[in-house]
Image (cartoon, rainbow, N blue to C red):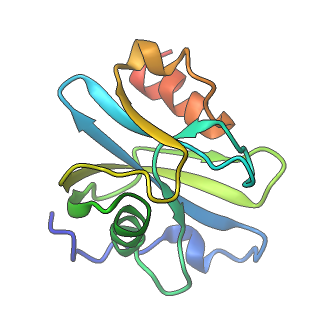
Amino acid sequence: PSVRAAIRCPTMNAPSPRTTPVVAAVIRRGDRYLVCQRPAHKRHGGLWEFPGGKVHAGESLTEAVERELREELGLTTVTVGPEPRFEAPDPASSFVILFLDTEADGEPHPIEHQALGWFPPGELSGLPLAPSDLRFVKEVLLGG
């Protein structure tokens, strides 16, 4: 599917105004996945995460992924999966993290993060990951 495909966020129209959708781009190259270390001053500061961010009102999931990857890493988005691969609430917050398979062009640069890296699933599980990202790695990438 094209990056321009209109994937609307199902939680954007949810009755609860307390839910904030957040996209997480799952970018894979070979057997490695791209993760970034959050800035120290932000929620979950210093922890590692799949890149992404909050979905703006009226924005599709695809548009949010495209914007976030451009702003945070200087990447161009090629495709975004048709629906989230995994969904997880972020503990003690209104955020619901929507993990989307994503293909991107270019080499990422940590514009808003402290660091970035490419890791196979087994190494990802050993990193200090944000809680929802750890659930995704354990339940989806490692299958358990």
Please state the horizontal and vertical placement of residue 118, each as a whole percent of the image.
34, 30
Which residue is found at the position 56% from the left and 85% from the top? 57
Quarter of the image where one finds residue 117: top left
> Which picture quadrant has residue 116?
top left
Q: At 35% across and 52% down in the image, what residue appears? A: 109
Whether residue 8 can be seen here: yes
58 shown above or below 90: below
Q: Residue at x 51, y 69 (%)?
A: 10
Relative side of 46 to 100, left or right: right
**x then y, percent, for residue 47:** 64, 36
Q: Nearer the viewer, residue 9 or 126?
A: 126
Q: Quadrant location of the N terminus? A: bottom left
Give the residue at x 39% y 19%.
Answer: 121
Q: Picture quarter containing residue 80? A: bottom left
Residue 66 drawn at (x, y percent): 33, 69
Position of residue 108 relative to residue 12, above or below, is above
Q: What x and y, as percent, mark residue 50?
A: 47, 43
Image position of 100 (left or right of 126):
left
